[in-house]
Amino acid sequence: MFIAKIRFLCQTIEVAEHDVHVITLRDRQQFEDDGGEAERLGISEASWPLFGVVWDSSRVLAEMMSTQDVEGLRILEVGSGIGLASLVLNRRGADITATDQHPRAPGLLARNTALNEDPPIPFVRAGWADESDELGTFDLLVGSDLLYDPGAAALLAAFVDRHGKERCEFILVDPGRGYVSKLRKALQARGFEQIRTDMIGTAADDGVKPMRVVAFAR
């Protein structure tokens, strides 16, 4: 049962030496789409709240970005949601841009950036199939839990290809949804090669949850 008026939760997430303050949706039962914008974008009532909560994979990505070499790099967080990794990179002074298709994502990211008293993070709303967006190209693209259905791999590979510079890197944290091999093949067809794969165990309520970190470069 989804409620008519969304509620929020304020929390502080420790990412390495950074205390990141975030306002998120209270839980995954929140929903609000009075104007039907999300529905027109193909975002269902059930998937609407998924952008606005903190996932284990996004924590792993944020931890990685707390030590990532960012000097001189233009960086894009793909499918940013609340943008935890972007908030960490922004705190470090990186050249970070965030993108997500969800209509509520930019407002929540701006609210969280202000809450942390950090400079505004550039945001461009775009779907992976959009070819007319104004994102430009990047040296490093990062994302977490992006392969949520069988068709996502091809769309994501095309998006990374379109917005990656001639020489670029793409880092993905995946919680084991089973489509990494599809992504690998789609990226290899676009001139990328897989340069890294690691398994990271993260604490979860039901034990240790493995996360796969894969990196591609061209």
Image (tube, rainbow, N blue to C red):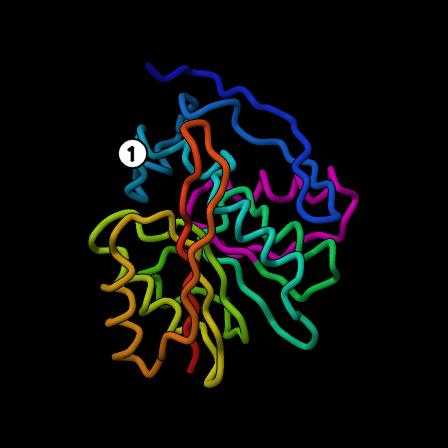
Q: Nearer the viewer, residue 149 or 110?
A: 149
Please name the amino acid that badge 1 sits on: Ser
Q: Nearer the viewer, residue 205 or 186?
A: 205
On screen, residue 118 versus residue 44, left or right, reads right
On screen, residue 115 versus residue 7, left or right, reads right
Q: Is residue 119 magenta?
A: yes
Q: Position of residue 97 (x, y in %)?
A: 58, 60
On screen, residue 91 versus residue 50, left or right, reads right
Q: Does 61 sit above or below residue 159?
A: above
Q: Which residues are magenta?
A: 98-126
Label 1: how many Cα within 10 Å (few below 14, some 14–19, many 20+): few
Q: Does 43 sit above or below residue 186?
A: above
Q: Position of residue 29 (x, y in %)?
A: 40, 21
Q: Is residue 211 magenta?
A: no
Which residue shows up at 35% across the image and 62% down it?
130
Q: Does 33 sit above or below residue 132?
A: above
Which residue shows up at 48% across the image and 41% down it?
56
Q: Nearer the viewer, residue 203 or 111?
A: 203
Q: Does 138 sit above or below residue 81?
A: below
Quadrant in which the C terminus is drawn: bottom left
Looking at this view, name the residue that lies furthest to the left. 150
Q: Position of residue 151 (x, y in %)?
A: 21, 55
